[in-house]
Image (tube, helix red, strand yellow):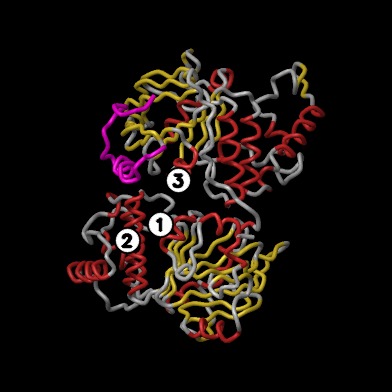
């Protein structure tokens, strides 16, 4: 347990927190609260007598590992689920939300990671779409645009009400979602991973808006795995662990760092930063060479526009970019899953054929795709079968056309132990948690004796414990001399792991910089396509 949890300060308390008098005072001042909430599903207790409250005029973080009960609690608070036990309070009074609509009427909104916007409509049209239930209401474009603009100005949200949503960036679309809630009278906002696809500049703008909302008396529940952001923007933090209230801290009274929060979430010390020595020595050879790589989709639109990169033995090269800027095309071209239309890829000096998976595997390329279940693994097959998908033709796992099933099972059991995978060799992959499925994929790829591992968004959707394991495995691979191409939309992850950072936007490399001393503002500008195109300031 982190030291700050044992200070005796009332601002930092474990479990069900504070004296009865303090708890009642917080309840009276709360915008939204839960007392003793329990919710069970067949075979699992998702919430076990959870207490939670967010006060008016504050940003309150709700943290926990995957499976800790955060999502269930939020669904109970917003009327998607009915609690088995316990009471919900809005503005200090007991309430019942039989449906999400009833929570909306009480001013409680949840903004999910995946936006519910209509691209061909304007910002103003999206804000009012489906809101009014008055049959006499008529849409007056100018009036609505003026109202939306006034609401945006009030909360410091920069957006053009007349802009077509389809033309907006991800950050701008998120602002539209916030405006929808505020225009409709939201007094409590629940934000689920709101910065997962934002540039550093967009994240800072969001934080300004959240603080403005708090100043106006609104309440914000901030759910995130980015713990540095939690300590930056939030006033209080509550942590769930295994469905129970694990602790709460007042970040305005006591300094709590990201490591302390991570430790509380999992009940042990967590180390996410992996800036330890890479395996790249002064004479490390170049494993991956990409020159002027070009790729197009089925409609002929350019996905990659002359990408050039080098990755050396023992190095982690991070490719940073906002979703949809060519990262997937780059990864699949290297992995042989998709043919490329121009340029060249070399592995250890030898050209790699376009669109040939078997030749790519034989060249020593391991691949961990972002879609772990749809592309990387066969979810309807057993763990042992997934482990042997790349090796079943080899002498260790087959004799001619006959599989050596005992050897496959023994290897699988060894890997389950070595990679600390919670599961059985005969378990179906779809029965595993996200973190354990990812470790099965990494176990298969990292033990294939690769020269290069291409890994895309390796910790997306994982909790801090699984994130720690995945990052450890990638760092250890680099120390052994494996070249690692890390493609991630999480800039913090890249900064923690990578030796160098290449920034991609609209299928072009905007620049390559050393991770040590990298400027966030510079990277943020390149993420938005305002860097110097090409590799003109690459450190190779």
- The front one of 256 and 522 is 256
Residue 301 image point, x, y percent = 32, 32
Could you tell me if the residues under marks 2 and 3 are in contact, i.e. CB atoms within 8 Å? no
Secondary structure beneath dot 3 equals loop
Q: CA distance from mark 1 to mark 3?
A: 19 Å
In what quadrant of the picture does the C terminus appear?
top left
Q: Which mark is residue 253?
A: none
Picture quadrant of residue 116: bottom left
- Main secondary structure along the magenta-highlighted residues: loop
Q: Is residue 537 magenta?
A: yes
Please provide the residue range marked out in magenta: 516-540
Q: Which residue is mark 2?
A: 176
Name the residue carrying label 3.
490
Asked if residue 406 is positioned above or below residue 525 in the image, the reply reads: above
Residue that badge 1 annotates: 115
- The alpha-carbon separation of the residues under discs 1 and 2 comes to 9 Å
**Disc nearer the start of the sequence (1/2):** 1
Tell me which corner region of the image, top left, top right, bottom left or bottom right, holds residue 81. Answer: bottom right
Determine the secondary structure under disc 2. Answer: helix
Check disc 1: other Cα within 10 Å, few if <14, some if 14-19, many if 20+: few
Marks 2/3: CA distance? Answer: 22 Å
Residue 75 shows up from this direction: no
Q: Is residue 2 left or right of residue 257?
A: right
Please say if the residues under marks 1 and 3 sit with CB atoms less than 8 Å apart.
no
Figure check: 486 above or below 340: below
Q: Residue at x 65, y 77 (%)?
A: 85
Measured as percent of width and height from the top left, residue 173 is found at 33, 56
Q: Residues within 10 Å of mark 3 (few under 14, many from 20)?
A: many
């Amino acid at each position: 347990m982190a030291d700050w949890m044992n200070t005796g300060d009332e601002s930092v308390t474990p479990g069900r927190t504070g004296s009865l008098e303090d708890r009642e005072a917080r309840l009276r001042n709360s915008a939204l609260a839960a007392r003793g909430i329990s919710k069970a599903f067949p075979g699992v207790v998702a919430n076990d007598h959870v207490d939670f409250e967010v006060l008016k005029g504050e940003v309150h973080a709700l943290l926990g590992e995957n499976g800790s009960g955060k999502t269930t609690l939020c669904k109970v608070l917003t009327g998607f689920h009915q609690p088995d036990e316990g009471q919900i309070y809005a503005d200090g009074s007991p309430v019942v939300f039989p449906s999400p609509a009833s929570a909306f009427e009480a001013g409680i909104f949840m903004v999910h990671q995946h936006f519910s916007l209509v691209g061909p409509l304007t910002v103003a049209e999206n804000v009012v779409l489906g809101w009014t239930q008055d049959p006499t209401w008529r849409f007056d474009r100018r009036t609505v645009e003026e109202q939306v603009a006034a609401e945006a100005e009030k909360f410091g949200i920069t957006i053009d009400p007349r802009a077509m949503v389809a033309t907006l960036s991800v950050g701008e679309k998120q602002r539209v979602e916030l405006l929808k809630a505020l225009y409709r009278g939201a007094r409590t906002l629940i934000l689920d991973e709101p910065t997962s696809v934002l540039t550093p500049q967009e994240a800072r703008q969001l934080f300004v808006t959240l603080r403005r909302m708090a100043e106006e008396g609104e309440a914000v529940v901030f759910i995130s795995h980015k713990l540095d952001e939690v300590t930056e923007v939030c006033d209080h933090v509550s942590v769930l662990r295994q469905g129970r209230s694990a602790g709460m801290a007042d970040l305005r009274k006591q300094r709590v760092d990201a490591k302390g929060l991570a430790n509380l979430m999992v009940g042990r010390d967590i180390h996410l930063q992996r800036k330890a020595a890479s395996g790249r020595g002064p004479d490390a050879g170049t494993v991956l060479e990409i020159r002027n790589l070009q790729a197009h989709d089925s409609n002929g639109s350019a996905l990659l526009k002359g990408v050039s990169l080098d990755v050396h033995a023992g190095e982690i090269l991070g490719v940073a970019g906002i979703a949809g800027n060519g990262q997937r095309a780059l990864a699949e071209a290297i992995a042989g899953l998709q043919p490329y239309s121009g340029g060249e890829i070399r592995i250890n000096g030898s050209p790699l054929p376009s669109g040939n998976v078997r030749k790519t595997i034989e060249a020593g390329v391991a691949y961990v795709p972002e879609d772990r279940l749809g592309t990387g693994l066969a979810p309807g097959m057993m763990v042992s079968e997934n482990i042997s998908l790349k090796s079943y033709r080899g002498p260790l796992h087959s004799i001619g056309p006959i599989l050596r099933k005992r050897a496959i099972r023994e290897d699988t059991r060894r890997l389950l132990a070595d990679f600390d995978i919670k599961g059985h060799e005969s378990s179906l992959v779809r029965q595993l948690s996200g973190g354990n499925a990812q470790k099965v994929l990494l176990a298969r790829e990292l033990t294939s004796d690769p020269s290069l591992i291409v890994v895309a968004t390796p910790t997306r959707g994982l909790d801090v414990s699984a994130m720690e394991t995945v990052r450890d495995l990638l760092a250890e691979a680099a120390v052994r001399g494996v070249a690692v191409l890390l493609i991630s939309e999480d800039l913090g992850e890249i900064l923690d792991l990578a030796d160098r950072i290449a920034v991609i936007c609209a299928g072009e490399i905007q620049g390559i910089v050393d991770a040590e001393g990298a400027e966030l503002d510079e990277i943020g500008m390149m993420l938005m396509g305002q860097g110097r195109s090409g590799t003109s300031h690459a450190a190779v």
